[in-house]
Image (cartoon, rainbow, N blue to C red):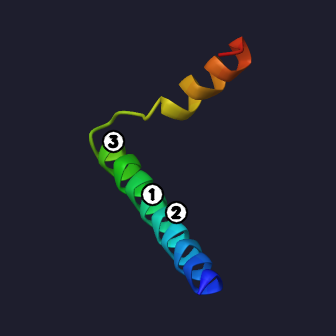
Amino acid sequence: MEAETQLKYAFLNKQNEQQERENARQRETTLAQAGKRDITPALLAYLLMLGY
């Protein structure tokens, strides 16, 4: 039973990762069509470099 639960969680995590990637692609496409750029990755990298 525990193995079955772990498999379900693994499957749900994989689905969630795929959905997040798809959402990111859609966001990038929308921004590109609007002539804008998503600065989130650059902002996160900057904050990590600062130590936050």
The location of residue 48, given as percent across then percent down, is 68, 22
Asked where in the image residue 50 lies, by quadrant, the reply is top right
Q: Are marks 2 and 1 in contact (CB under 8 Å)?
A: yes
Foreground mark, 3 or 2?
2
| Number of other residues with Cα within 10 Å of mark 1, as a class: few under 14, some 14 to 19, many 20 or more | few
The residue positioned farthest toward the left in the image shown: 34
Gap in angstroms between the C-alphas marked 2 and 1: 5 Å
Identified by mark 2, the residue type is Glu
Identified by mark 3, the residue type is Leu
Q: Residue at x 71, y 15 (%)?
A: 51
The residue beneath circle 2 is 17
| Number of other residues with Cα within 10 Å of mark 3, as a class: few under 14, some 14 to 19, many 20 or more | few
Q: Is mark 2 on a helix, strand or loop?
A: helix
Q: Which residue is drawn at 55% across and 23% down?
A: 43
- What count of labels does the image hold? 3
Q: Identify which residue, 8 or 36, lies in the foreground.
A: 8
The circle drawn on residue 31 is 3
Asked where in the image residue 26 lies, by quadrant, the reply is bottom left
The C terminus, quarter of image: top right
Q: In this view, does 30 lie to the left or right of 5?
A: left
The residue beneath circle 1 is 20
Q: Is residue 36 left or right of residue 20?
A: left
The location of residue 34, given as percent across then percent down, is 27, 39
Q: Is residue 8 above or below residue 20?
A: below
Q: Is mark 1 on a helix, strand or loop?
A: helix
Asked where in the image residue 25 lies, by quadrant, the reply is bottom left
Q: Is mark 3 on a helix, strand or loop?
A: helix
